[in-house]
């Protein structure tokens, strides 16, 4: 455990962050700031879908399923941790990382949408493991990516999210941990056993509804505390570049801390560079690779650029208004404390948001993990995979997560490195 902890501290506090941020900047330049086409991506994702197929994700379905996997508790707890440890300036760096990360999301989903290969059932499919095997002829790296995908699904897709659900149910609604763990496993299992179409329908129904619900709570907070918005924005931008010392209880933060925690949260919330968005893009009905890449890129926009930014402004405004209160809180509880200041149902709104986002992540990551499992075992043992996934949901709801988080960070390296290798080797095939 100590070895894994120290290894993660070394890798994820420096080399990996530099690698990912460099990758985002490279693709931003290589694709001539493809982010400028974000409005087209949004229009495509919510517009008519003439190529829709019952055997593939629709345009809007591919957007919401990608968001289902990335819109997890990291958007709530992760931003809280970034602001608590890195100060107001971390919000700016988190936002900026999301902006640049959109280009990497475009790149990986463009490749997976353009190059598709028959899967174990003979249907066109794609993802980093298929591209590594058939496009680059690296069978071993494809196997490694698929194996890491399964393990990540069982850890980050199951245990961390189900634990967040049971914690919220216990603290806000008083439901015991075993009961909420069983209910969570039952609900997710019911959805997964119905197949891909139910995953898509669940994502299309829950993700936009709960994102609007949570953002509504944030906007309400900002309206009620609007006098702190200008000061919050000022602290965010000044803290991002270390232009002036922090005041109002926000002293002690440095430029280094703002960059470190802001970039780290921005990188981890949208999963740009891990290649997972390409799994949905490779299963979409959209025949134009550029269009699908723009749709997938818009998921990173909503996830990090919009949701994380607004959450960050709320947290900094809360810090400025209650300087003596927030310093006595834990790193992950700033959002809960801020929502507790709403005049009605603040804690309940946040709890429902956490539960819904976590459920969506459980459903979305089940698809990712199954893609890796089918690749490894050629479509055999699907029921075994689903049974174990549901079992891990229950286990995650009742177990301590310290070791799980550390293992997840380590496993994600085995997603990241093959994906980065793929992107760099295929850079000449990218077009904006």
Image (cartoon, rainbow, N blue to C red):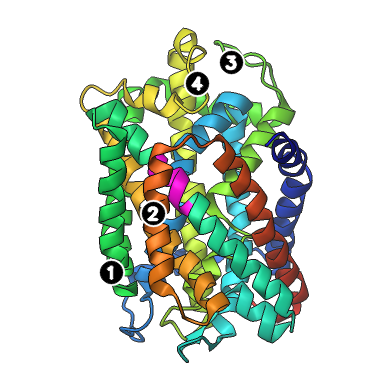
Mark closer to the chain start, 2 or 1: 1
Identify the image quadrant of residue 222. top left
In three-dimensional space, the C-alpha distance between marks 2 and 4, rounded to whole angstroms, equals 30 Å
Q: How far across and down, in percent of the image, does residue 427 sit?
A: 74, 74
In three-dimensional space, the C-alpha distance between marks 4 and 3, rounded to whole angstroms, equals 15 Å
Main secondary structure along the magenta-highlighted residues: helix
Q: Which residue is the site of mark 1? A: 198
Identify the image quadrant of residue 62. bottom left
Residue, x 49% and y 40% (percent of image)?
Answer: 309
**In this rendering, which labeled residue sits more in front, label 2 or label 1?**
2
Residue, x 65% and y 63% (percent of image)?
Answer: 33
Mark closer to the chain start, 4 or 3: 3
135 or 90: which is nearer to us? 135
Q: Is residue 65 magenta?
A: no
Kindly identify which numbered label has been placed on residue 330.
Answer: 4
Q: Secondary structure at mark 2?
A: helix
In three-dimensional space, the C-alpha distance between marks 3 and 1, rounded to whole angstroms, equals 46 Å
Q: Please state the extent of the stretch shown in magenta in the rendering.
A: 157-163
Mark 4 and mark 2 in contact (Cβ < 8 Å)? no
Kindly identify which numbered label has been placed on residue 429.
Answer: none
In three-dimensional space, the C-alpha distance between marks 1 and 4, rounded to whole angstroms, equals 37 Å
**In this rendering, which labeled residue sits more in front, label 4 or label 3?**
4
Q: Which residue is the site of mark 2? A: 391
Q: Which residue is the site of mark 3? A: 250
Q: Secondary structure at mark 1?
A: helix
Q: How far across and down, in percent of the image, does residue 64 sit?
A: 38, 62
């Amino acid at each position: 455990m100590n070895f894994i902890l120290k290894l993660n501290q070394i890798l994820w506090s420096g080399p990996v962050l530099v690698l990912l941020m460099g990758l985002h900047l490279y693709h931003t330049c290589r694709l001539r700031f493809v982010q400028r086409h974000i409005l087209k991506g949004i229009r495509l994702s919510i517009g008519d879908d003439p190529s829709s197929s019952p055997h593939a994700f629709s345009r809007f379905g591919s957007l919401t399923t990608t968001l289902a996997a990335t819109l997890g508790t990291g958007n709530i707890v992760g931003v809280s941790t970034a602001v608590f440890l890195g100060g107001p300036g971390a919000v700016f760096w988190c936002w900026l990382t999301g902006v640049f990360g959109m280009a990497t999301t475009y790149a990986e989903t463009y490749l997976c949408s353009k190059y598709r290969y028959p899967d174990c059932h003979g249907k066109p499919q794609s993802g980093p493991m298929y591209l590594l095997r058939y496009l680059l002829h690296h069978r071993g790296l494809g196997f490694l990516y698929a194996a890491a995908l399964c393990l990540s699904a069982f850890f980050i897709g199951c245990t961390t999210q189900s634990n967040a659900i049971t914690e919220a149910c216990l603290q806000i609604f008083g439901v015991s941990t075993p009961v909420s763990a069983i209910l969570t496993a039952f609900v997710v299992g019911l959805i997964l056993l119905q197949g891909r179409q139910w995953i898509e329908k669940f994502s299309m129904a829950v993700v936009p509804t709960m994102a609007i619900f949570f953002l509504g709570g944030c906007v309400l907070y900002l309206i009620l505390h609007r006098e702190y918005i200008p000061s919050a924005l000022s602290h965010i931008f000044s803290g991002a570049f270390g232009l002036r010392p922090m005041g109002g209880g926000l002293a002690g933060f440095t430029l280094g801390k703002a960059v470190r925690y802001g970039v780290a949260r921005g990188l981890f919330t949208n999963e740009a560079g891990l290649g997972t968005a390409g799994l949905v893009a490779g299963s979409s009905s959209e025949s134009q690779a550029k269009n699908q890449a723009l749709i997938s890129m818009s998921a990173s926009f909503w996830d990090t650029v919009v949701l994380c930014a607004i959450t960050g402004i709320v947290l900094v405004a809360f810090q400025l208004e209650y300087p003596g209160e927030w310093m006595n809180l834990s790193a992950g509880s700033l959002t809960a404390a801020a929502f507790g200041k709403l005049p009605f149902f603040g804690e309940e709104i946040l709890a429902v948001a956490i539960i819904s986002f976590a459920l969506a992540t459980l459903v979305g990551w089940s698809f990712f993990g199954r893609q890796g499992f089918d690749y490894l075992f050629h479509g055999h043992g699907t029921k075994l995979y689903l049974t174990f996934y549901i079992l891990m949901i229950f286990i995650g709801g009742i177990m301590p997560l310290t070791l799980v988080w550390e293992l997840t960070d380590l496993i994600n390296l085995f997603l990241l490195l093959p994906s980065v290798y793929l992107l760099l080797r295929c850079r000449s095939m990218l077009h904006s």
